[in-house]
Amino acid sequence: MAPNIIFITSDQHRADAMGFLKPEVHTPHLDRLSADGTHFGTCITPSYVCQPARASILTGLLPLTHGVRDNGIDLPPDTGARGFAGQLGSRGYETAFFGKAHFSTKATFAATGTPEDQYNGALYERGWEGPYMGFQHVNLSVVGHFHKDRPPKRPLVGHWERWFLERGHDEEALRVWAEEVEAGQGAAQTWASALPVAWHSSTWIADRTIEWLSRRDRRKPFCIWTSFPDPHHPFDCPLPWSRLHRPAEISLPANRVMDLDRRPWWHRASLEGKPELDDPVLRRFREKGSRMPVQSDGQLAEMTANYYGMISLVDHSVGRILEALSHLQLADETYVVYASDHGDMLGNHGLYLKGPTPYEDLLRVPLLVRGPGVEAGATVNEPVSTLDLAPTFMEWSGAQPGANLHGSSLAGLCRGEDAPREAAYCEWHVEPSRCGVALRLHTVRTRTAKLTVEANSGAGEMYDLAADPDEMDNLFDKPEALALRQELEGLLAKAPSRSAEAAPLPIVGMT
């Protein structure tokens, strides 16, 4: 029988926030996954924000091709159905999705009819559990994180959201989630939540995954995508995980002050521009909710400790799934892959969360692989991308990855073969509705260097990451770096989606 695949993702997990890379972060199960398998140390995201990145993972296509150029644009269902889940399903795999999909927009301005649309609560009343985007069985956490300034609308969409609201008495779960169990430093969108861990989305998602594994059709191989919403903001880590990392012991970025004068023009413009949105709630959220105010060192340490605690709770949930595989005697015949959609600035260069500032903090993501024939204890530093996962899953299933995919299978690299990669690509087209300015960002990353060009203006930034890993010296306009710039521009011109750049941009909503 063909091998099984469990693909586990977190949301907004920096590439360096794992214990085997940064010992102050408590991730024993991810550390073991790395020791038992292969760690890809230079894996990048195809986009700096959730929806384009997730659509690219599913389809193996860059954002300009699948059409999801920014949050707020739905992945066309027929495109999603042709992704890796649909391909494996057609080969006899059982496919399932648990957790945060974000293939479609929740905060739409009008009903769109998708399972993630905030107006589609009646779908869940009818007991809907799929299919969706090629996955045969689906249990969704549509929000995963509530925001205190954006009350949830009823009826709630999402299997976890509806389950969550039923915990306790009279919406007790929602109340205790917002309670702060101890005084903090006042860090933005950060508190130690009183929510019981048993009611947390990470726990629920692991529970649903393990339950499905226990009752699946044992005559078929399976492919599961288990998607945790943490450690995405708000940083609302519950006890006891919120106390696992002590703020006083957190190491802060060396360059934690804004240095916009040394950056291309759009860094400042994206921070100071006004989102062009008619909806006042969404406009306020774009202006404040996704642009953290300047933090003191104490506030940044508190935020970071809570962020790490959320990662540790995800790690605990990953460990439960790995133990279930062992208990069910599936470990030897199952590939386990861990990744994230994008990173988080976490105070570096004085910035927080994510935005059109293509630093390594956002661009690089974790990627760990364990499974049959995968080299143990290995680190691969070739420039790869989460775009490469769809063709990898197809090769593992015995299918021939389509020639139209933008990613390339990682199976050879996982086996320890010498398979050098030239470059990996990222792109994000930002509309004025996001930050008041239109941007067309294209990034190419090699093993040792990175170039980003804003196509509207021709401005750019370029870093020699071998000599300048902190990205302090923008070489884009420096004559002595002309040869490197020409080399990277030549690679950027090879990006397979540049022909789609002029396609229209159908905004359907904003998240």
Image (spheres, rainbow, N blue to C red):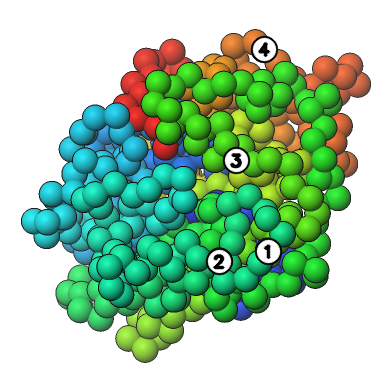
Q: Earlier in the sequence, mark 2 or mark 4?
A: 2
Left of 132 or right of it: where is 347?
right
Q: Position of residue 384 (x, y in %)?
A: 58, 46
- The residue closer to the viewer here, 103 or 63, is 103
In this figure, what is the number of numbered marks? Answer: 4
Residues packed near mark 3 inside 10 Å, few (<14), some (14 to 19) or many (20 plus): many
Whether residue 28 can be seen here = yes
Q: Nearer the viewer, mark 4 or mark 1?
A: 1
Tell me the distance, in whole angstroms, between the alpha carbons under discs 3 and 2. 25 Å
Q: Which mark is residue 180?
A: 2
Q: Earlier in the sequence, mark 4 or mark 1?
A: 1
Q: Nearer the viewer, mark 4 or mark 3?
A: 3
Residue type highlighted by circle 2:
Glu
Tell me the element at label 4. loop
Q: Earlier in the sequence, mark 3 or mark 2?
A: 2
Disc 4 marks which residue?
458
Q: Earlier in the sequence, mark 1 or mark 3?
A: 1
Residue type highlighted by circle 1:
Gly
Q: Which mark is residue 354?
A: 3
Task: Give the residue furthest to the left.
Answer: 126
Tell me the element at label 2. loop
Residue type highlighted by circle 3:
Lys
Disc 1 marks which residue?
184
CB contact under 8 Å: marks 4 and 3: no
Residue type highlighted by circle 4:
Gly
